Structures are given as structure tokens and as C-alpha cells.
Image (tube, grey):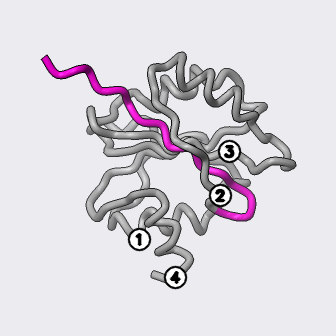
Amino acid sequence: MTTVEQTLADRLGLTAGQVVRELGWDEDSDDRLRAAVEEWTGNGLVEQDYEEAADLALLWWREQDGDLVDGLMDALHGLTPDAFIWLLTPRTGLNGHVEPADIAESAASTGLDRRPPVDLTPDWTGTRLDQRRAPAA
């Protein structure tokens, strides 16, 4: 793994053996980021129809992709209780950029906690969205 791939894997919080579901892939998705995920986890990315529970989801999302709440609900389906979503959006100024306010509103609507965004590649920003945990009884 190259230093760039190692940095991407570290930023994403990946661990070996994780199953990563990928949604929203298109020709503009960053293949280097995808390769880093596969290299670090030791598994190929699985598609939305994967029948086992996944440890996290990579959701490539562009403004023109539709309703982000629907996209996040799709990404949540089939995740383990401790799983999280990386929402990958084009960086500011690029075609398909998603406004941070739209991300915050959509995350809140789907019961996800949003972490600050990080620049992952020259074209893509990632926002980690965590499932809210129920209070301990």
C-alpha cells in the first residue's frame, strides 16, 4: 500500500476484515480511494444487494442524485448496529457539490450524527455519519 492509500485508509477509520458496502458509484468516483479501502480491509467492495450485514457504507453522492435522505436510508439498510456511513461528495466548486447545510439536515432527518467533513482526494470530501446509539437502560 502506498503512503497515499495508507493516509486514506487511516482517515476513513478502516480496519482489516471490514465489509464495506458501496453505493452511488459512477465513472467520476475516485478509484484510488476505492482501491485503498479494498487494500486496507482485505475485501472487495460489496454492492447494495449484498445479503450479509456490512460494517460501513461508502455513499458517493452528488447534488443531482436526488433526495439525500432517501440515499442515506438506502445506505443504512443492512448495516451492523455499530456501522457508519462515509458520505462522499464532490468538493466545493465542483459539479455536483452538496451544501454542508443539506448534509446536516439530511443526517438529522435520518437519525445520524455528523462529524466534520474531511478532504479525502482532490475531488472528493467525506463526511462520516454515525448511527445514534440508544441510551443505556
User: In the image, what residue type sits under mark 3?
Assistant: Thr
Structural crowding at the residue carrying mark 1, measured as other residues with C-alpha within 10 Å and reported as few (<14), some (14–19) or many (≥20): some
Mark 3 lies on a secondary structure that is strand
**What percent of the width, then of the height, locates residue 13?**
40, 57
Looking at the rendered structure, which numbered label has been put on residue 39? 1
User: For residue 134: magenta?
Assistant: yes
Can you say whether 133 is above or below 16 in the image?
above
First in sequence: mark 1 vs mark 2: 1
First in sequence: mark 1 vs mark 3: 1
Q: Residue at x 28, y 38 (%)?
A: 82
Q: Which residue is mark 4?
A: 3
* Label 2 – label 3 distance at C-alpha: 10 Å
Q: Nearer the viewer, mark 1 or mark 3?
A: 3
Q: Residue furthest bottom?
A: 2
Label 2 with label 4: CB-CB less than 8 Å: no
Q: Residue at x 61, y 64 (%)?
A: 31
Structural crowding at the residue carrying mark 2, measured as other residues with C-alpha within 10 Å and reported as few (<14), some (14–19) or many (≥20): some
**What percent of the width, then of the height, locates residue 137?**
13, 16
Residues drawn in magenta:
121-137
User: For residue 109: magenta?
Assistant: no
* Label 4 – label 1 distance at C-alpha: 12 Å
Q: Which residue is mark 3?
A: 89
